[in-house]
Image (cartoon, rainbow, N blue to C red):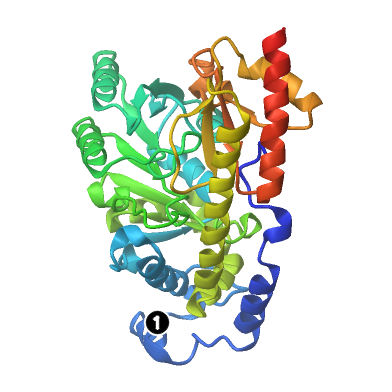
Amino acid sequence: SDLGQPAPGELPESLVLEATKCLLSGKPHEDSGPLAKRRRSLKEDSAESSEPLSYGDETFHYRSELSKFLGRCDASRDGVAPEPARLMLTAGVSQALDMLCTMHASAANEDAVLVEAETYFLASDIFCNHGLKIIGVDTDGEGILPTALESTLNQLREEGRRAALLYVIPVHHNPTGRTMSASRRSAVAELAKKHGTLVVADEVYTLLTYGEARPPATFASCGDHVLSLGSFSKVLAPGLRVGWIEGSAEQLKHLSRWAVINSGGYLSHFASCIVATAMEKRLVDRHLDQLRQRYAARCEALLKALGEFLPKECTVACRPDGGYFVWLRLPQDISATELAKTAAKHGVVFKEGCVFSPAGELAGHFDGRVRLCFARLADAELAEGVKRLAAALKDASAV
């Protein structure tokens, strides 16, 4: 599949329905328990209510439940929950990126956004909409190269410009599937701090880590100049539009001054109350366990089929231990762009490597690669898709 989304038929409608009924009928968090004591200590009045149908000026219930959920379910945290004060409600990663561009970057100042040489292509569109210059930085099997990053930052400084943001995907990278080591993260964070650059780590796939693998601690632990973005789009349902930013209280206070929040309250407030209730009842925990098992099996099924049906010249750049994707190198002289046309005739689709090039500047370099998504299809469908891809490759090689 060319879509990096959950399969519609596998979305947890019954879970969302149960949480919604509980939220609107019982509201168990309202009158008693630690949360109630905390709310009373804050001396909230009606204008600062966390009622699900209000504007959403107060998000403590969501942040409190999210904190406990991450402590329970994110293996990279060793059971240590983040402080609720370090968490901020968002309407997903896309909205968070848009807000960060507004609050931390300026096209008028010719600010740049640095990204990995291969990056999430729709994030690039958001940066472009803000008039920001996108610059791709060379990578290796661990992610962005510190030497290349330092060179780019120094070049911008010499030009009298700055990199306002450094956008990275450090865990189960989209599209390559790689994970950045703790030492590499530290080196990248240190360089960014030296140049006054805010690191924005898109960590939406951390919770989708399979087997015994355990990613390094969240990138937000590398300093107050680092923000981590998370989302329930991949682990619950994208239609809810609920996510979070993790970072220092000072950074989050700055973001809370975003005019959209001042005017209309926090985004996705009602949906966040549903998610908070689902976390409180541990419905999300059970669903996440099922997803991990299902996706791990599908990942193995895809890798097995690739090894069985494709020519040996096709290689997997990184064997993923989480996420959604496999990054496949094609045989030499096969263009992914041209192969896509042939593959469509065989009834198989994928994302061509060139679309992951920031602003198209390295499109030619990645035209020999394709991104395959294993999350949406059953094992048998994945095997059939690889057989069709093999037939398309055979046709393309004969031309």
Residue at the far front in the pictured view: 308
Q: Report the residue at 65% width, 40% height from top.
A: 3
Q: Secondary structure at mark 1?
A: helix
Mark 1 belongs to which amino acid?
Arg
Q: Report the residue at 63% width, 47% height from top.
A: 5
Q: Nearer the viewer, residue 52 or 394?
A: 394
Q: Nearer the viewer, residue 369 or 229?
A: 369
Task: Tell me: residue 337, above or below residue 175.
Answer: above
Label 1 crowd bin: few (<14), some (14–19), many (20+), radius 10 Å? some
Task: Tell me: residue 34, above or below residue 354.
Answer: below
In the rendered image, the quadrant that contains the N terminus is top right
Q: Report the residue at 33% width, 40% height from top.
A: 180
Q: Position of residue 69 (x, y in %)?
A: 42, 70
Q: Position of residue 32 (x, y in %)?
A: 44, 92
Identify residue for label 1.
Answer: 39
Q: Quadrant of residue 395?
A: top right
Residue at the far bottom in the pictured view: 32
In the rendered image, the quadrant that contains the C terminus is top right
Left or right relative to 300: residue 388: right
Q: Is residue 7 in view from this perspective?
A: yes
Left or right relative to 335: residue 181: left
Q: Report the residue at 32% width, 54% height from top.
A: 247
Task: Tell me: residue 357, above or below residue 271.
Answer: above
